[in-house]
Image (spheres, grey):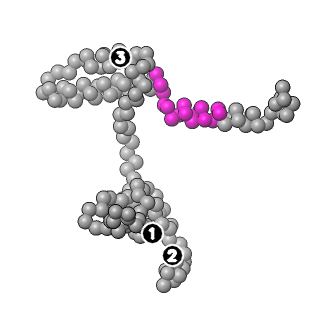
Amino acid sequence: MMGRFRRLIKELELQELELLGRRFTWSNERDSPTLVRLDRVLCSSSWEQLFPESLLQSTAAGISDHCPLILGLRDNARCRGRFHFESFWPSLDGFKEVVANAWAAPVLGMCPIEQLTAKFKGLTTALQSWSQKMVGNANTKLHQARELLHQLDIAQDNRPLSDLEA
């Protein structure tokens, strides 16, 4: 039966959608659990062309030993990323001034909770702007540093033997 099933999948040219966020979809829920990927979603190439932004995700298994799967579409709406405070920022020049200026900015006509929320939003915006100017995109800089190290390694490997002896 499994052989016939595999031949059918191959004949229909079905492809498995990648499951994000989880490697296993079933557990026997014991102290030393057995974890298995039982549940899968297959699609045809024409379906994948109609829905190129498809996304297969898992949710928490509450009352079942199977993990429920949700098939949806990626949200391509560009939104601002979450704010991430970096622990090294306070050691950089200008950090305390940015925090003081942002916190001192007036917020009027709101209840205290809304004022506090507005102050945190203003501080977030100020710190993100300051960080972009001071630090830049850390991932881009890290990639550039790795590329430079790679190029130096290549140059080191390509040196003539006579240079190595000197």
Report the mark closest to the observer, 3 or 1.
3
Instruction: Name the spot of residue 154 as percent of width and height, x first.
Output: 73, 37
Mark 1: give few (<14), some (14-19) or many (20+) Cα within 10 Å.
Answer: some
Q: Is residue 156 left or right of residue 20?
A: right
Instruction: Name the spot of residue 87 as percent of width and height, x first.
Output: 40, 28
Q: How far apart are the alpha carbons under marks 2 and 3?
A: 61 Å
Count the marks: how many? 3
Amino acid at pointer 1: Leu
Report the mark closest to the observer, 2 or 3.
3
Q: How far apart are the alpha carbons under marks 1 and 2?
A: 9 Å
Amino acid at pointer 2: Ile
Q: Which residue is mark 3?
A: 96
Residue at disc 3, secondary structure: helix
Residue at 50% across, 71% down: 14
> Residue 131 falls in which quadrant of the image?
top left
Mark 3: give few (<14), some (14-19) or many (20+) Cα within 10 Å.
Answer: few
Instruction: Name the spot of residue 139 as percent of width and height, x first.
Output: 51, 35
The answer to the question of whether label 1 and label 2 lie on touching residues, with beta carbons closer than 8 A, is yes
Q: How far apart are the alpha carbons under marks 3 and 1?
A: 54 Å
Position of the C terminus by quadrant: top right
Residue at 46% across, 22% down: 134
Specify the segment rendered in magenta: 134-149
Nearest the viewer among 55 and 96 is: 96
Please give the label number shown on residue 9.
2
Q: Which residue is mark 1?
A: 42
The answer to the question of whether label 3 and label 1 lie on touching residues, with beta carbons closer than 8 A, is no
N-terminal of the pair, mark 2 or mark 3, is 2
